[in-house]
Structure formats: structure tokens, C-alpha cells
């Protein structure tokens, strides 16, 4: 699951990309036909990116300011690019990991199992 997430591959077949563009999921997998309508990572990728990258980098920015008291342009050359690159680049792998996790664990809102079956049928079950 981690390999497919890192590469953004379909969680069922592991062959085709699940992304239409940088963060937009395809409607269905072109290889195996998995419908991605089950996936709802919502704000999860941004949350994890901020927690994993932005929070620790903030310590670096504060340390740099307190210890060295650099001019503002130093923050523009170091802190800002690190935050931007560090928070944007992991979004796709994190989103792919969340979608793959939802697929593998058959995640859905609590209490909606019967509604899900009625609306979507059983064709999207993971093949384990």
C-alpha cells in the first residue's frame, strides 16, 4: 500500500495513476476500472502536510530568528521556500496514501453501510 501511495498508483491493480492532475483524482482507474467515488480524503493531505512539515519547520524559522536575527530577506530565501516546497510536494503522496487506506480498509461514514450498498452496490470491494 505504501508503494502505491508513494507513486500515486491505483490501490487495486497498482498499475495506473489515480491522479488526473496534481491533486485531482480520476473518476475511474483506466487499467482495472476501480471507481474512485469511495475516496474522500477531504482536508487530510493538507492537515498531515502541515503537521509533518510545517510545524517542525516553524521551529527552524523561530530558531533562525532568535539565534541569528537575520534580515527579512534571509527568511525570504530560506524559510519561505522551505515551507512552500515542504508543504506542497508531500500533498500528492499523502492524498494517495489516504485514498489507498480508505480502499484497503473499506472506510466509510459510520452507520452508512446499508445506504452505501444500496447506492453503489458491491462492485467496488477490495480484492485481498
Image (cartoon, grey):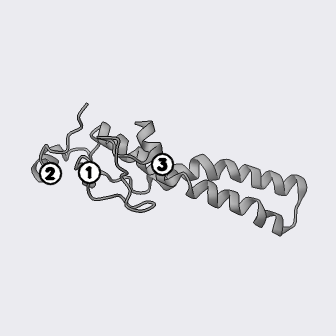
Nearest to N terminus: mark 1 or mark 2: 1
Residue 101: % across, % down: 36, 40
Residue 106: % across, % down: 27, 40
Residue contact at pointers 1 and 2, CB within 8 angstroms: yes
- Please identify the quadrant where the C terminus is shown: top left
Mark 1 residue crowding within 10 angstroms, few (<14) / some (14–19) / many (20+): some
Q: Name the residue under label 1.
A: 38
Q: What element carries label 1?
A: helix
Residue contact at pointers 2 and 3, CB within 8 angstroms: no
Q: Residue at x 34, y 46 (%)?
A: 10
Whole-number angstrom distance, CA of label 2 to CA of label 3: 27 Å
Nearest to N terminus: mark 2 or mark 3: 3
Q: Name the residue under label 3.
A: 93
Residue contact at pointers 1 and 3, CB within 8 angstroms: no
Please identify, in this view, whether the residue under mark 1 or under mark 3 is nearer the observer. 3
Q: Is residue 81 left or right of residue 36?
A: right
Q: Residue at x 63, y 61 (%)?
A: 84
Q: Which residue is drawn at 57% across and 48% down?
A: 51
Mark 3 residue crowding within 10 angstroms, few (<14) / some (14–19) / many (20+): many
Q: In this view, does 112 lie to the left or right of 24?
A: left
Q: In this view, does 41 lie to the left or right of 89?
A: left
Whole-number angstrom distance, CA of label 1 to CA of label 3: 18 Å
Residue 118, placed above or below residue 23: above
Residue 93: % across, % down: 48, 48
Count of marks overlaid on the render: 3
Whole-number angstrom distance, CA of label 1 to CA of label 2: 9 Å
Q: What label sits on residue 120 in the rendered view?
A: 2
View extreme (bottom): residue:
73
Amino acid at each position: 500500500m505504501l508503494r502505491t501511495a508513494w507513486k500515486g498508483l491505483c490501490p487495486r491493480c497498482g498499475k495506473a495513476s489515480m491522479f488526473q492532475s496534481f491533486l485531482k483524482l480520476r473518476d475511474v482507474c483506466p487499467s482495472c476500472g476501480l471507481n474512485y467515488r469511495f475516496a474522500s480524503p477531504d482536508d487530510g493531505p493538507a492537515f498531515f502536510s502541515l503537521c509533518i512539515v510545517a510545524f517542525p519547520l516553524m521551529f527552524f524559522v523561530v530558531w533562525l530568528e532568535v539565534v541569528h536575527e537575520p534580515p527579512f530577506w534571509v527568511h525570504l530565501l530560506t524559510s519561505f521556500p522551505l515551507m512552500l516546497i515542504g508543504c506542497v510536494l508531500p500533498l500528492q503522496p499523502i492524498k494517495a496514501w489516504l485514498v489507498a487506506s480508505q480502499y484497503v480498509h473499506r472506510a466509510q461514514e459510520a452507520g452508512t453501510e446499508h445506504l452505501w450498498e444500496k447506492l453503489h452496490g458491491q462492485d467496488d470491494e477490495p480484492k485481498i
